[in-house]
Image (cartoon, rainbow, N blue to C red):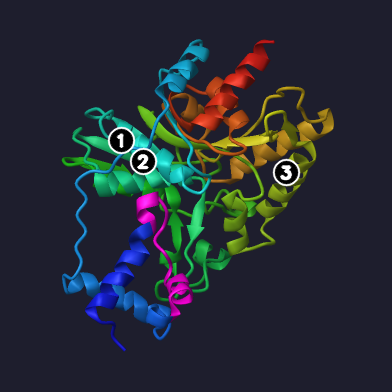
Amino acid sequence: MALSHEELLELVRLRMAPLKRGQKMLSYKRLRAEHPETFGRLSAVALGEEFVRAFKEELVAVKVTSIKPPEEDRQLAARLIDAFDHLSLAHAIVVKRRDERSLPADLGLAAAHDLSGRLRNGERIGVAAGQTVCWLSRYMRDFFRIRAKKITFVSMTGIFCARQRGHGPNEELLRGTRPAADGERSNILIDADINAIRMAQAVQSHVEFVLVASPAVGHFAQARGLMARNSWLGARDGKSRRTLDRAVVGIGALYDNWRLIDAVNARNPDHPIRRDLDRLRMICTGGAKEVSGGRLWWPVFDVANHLMLAEPRDGCRLSPRDCRAARDLVRRLNERVLTVSERDLKAAKLYAIAGGPRKSYPIYDALHAFDIETLVTDDVTARDLLAIQVASKN
């Protein structure tokens, strides 16, 4: 049964209301549960069709001319730059944290406001995966226009997302030893590729983007056939590698919710790389420590999904035995995951977007390991960075 025009308008209003808070639209399942009298009689699929009909019949039109940036703490940003003036940090954006749920969207929006006017003609920009970079690319595509010319966006892969339709990918499909069912190959999407495409869509004039277009993880036995070890940008022989002028990256900790574990599980829970991940997670769980102020020191962090061992901080360190084992596992994982190398990260000026729980120590280590020119973070994390810096001097 079709909805009336009044019900259609209410459907659109309720579903899109969370967008004002930087959150995802309400699912049709939740709309049916929260408003059973109005929408309970229709299935989720039927509600989706009605939602589209509201736009097709021009009952609703969305027009956004500008989007306000999140509130910033400029004084705290200046303190960050002063505290790390011995490093490469030249620009900082500190967003006032509203809540944990909206933080990735707020960081992405602040970065979009800044980066849209910062890119220069002819630049070659690396675009990584990650939640905050994903929000940046969405905002850039939908609300901003990049006026710089002859920009090249390069995918910096390292993690993949298996879409929820179909039965999902498996090893036979990735090796090409069996044909894909209709639509099945489209299940394999590289997050960084999607982010690079979105960024390219924001450019007004000539733009190019370089995609990887290959699975993120391969069997160790197939390393020489299916994919090169530790290769990226689709360059297996190294001849087509080019230095990036700038790279937009996220920074994270190898924690329980790190999505590579979920991505491997979606393909094959018995995958050899899963065993290494589980061993490394056990070492990290045993060595993690909570420091005063609620900060968590986690032994392994990543920049653009390139894994690195954290430096000992505030009395936190792994045992010599665990440190040796973790170092070996990190090396093996970096070799077997299609991801950017440490050499390529160090060759580019990084535009880092990261904040929230468990990120303070990884950001601090990344600031010392790489040429991070710009940091977009939140006020709580910024104060943690200042506290870690003071403790390190003492």
Q: Which residue is drawn at 69% across and 48% down?
A: 277
Visible residue check, residue 258: yes
- Asked if labels 2 and 3 touch by Cβ distance under 8 angstroms, the answer is no
Visible residue check, residue 211: no
Above or below, 206 against 63 in this view is above
Q: What element carries label 1?
A: helix
User: Percent position (x, y) of residue 156?
Assistant: 44, 41
Q: Name the residue under label 1.
A: 113
Q: Any mark on residue 280, and which?
A: 3
Does 21 lie within the magenta span?
A: yes
> Looking at the image, is mark 3 or mark 2 nearer the viewer?
2
Quadrant holding the N terminus: bottom left
Which is nearer the eye, 328 or 140? 140
Above or below, 283 against 4 in this view is above
Does 394 lie within the magenta span?
A: no
How many C-alpha atoms fall within 10 Å of the one at disc 2: few (<14), some, or many (≥20)?
many
Q: What element carries label 3?
A: helix
Q: What residue type is labelled 2?
A: Leu
Span highlighted in magenta in the image: 18-36
User: Percent position (x, y) of residue 30?
Assistant: 47, 70
- Asked if labels 1 and 2 touch by Cβ distance under 8 angstroms, the answer is yes
User: Percent position (x, y) of residue 71?
Assistant: 38, 34
Q: Any mark on residue 126, and which?
A: none
Q: Of the two numbered discs 3 and 2 on the same chain, state the one appearing first in sequence.
A: 2
Of helix, strand and loop, which mostly describes the magenta segment?
A: helix
Which is nearer the eye, 329 or 370? 370
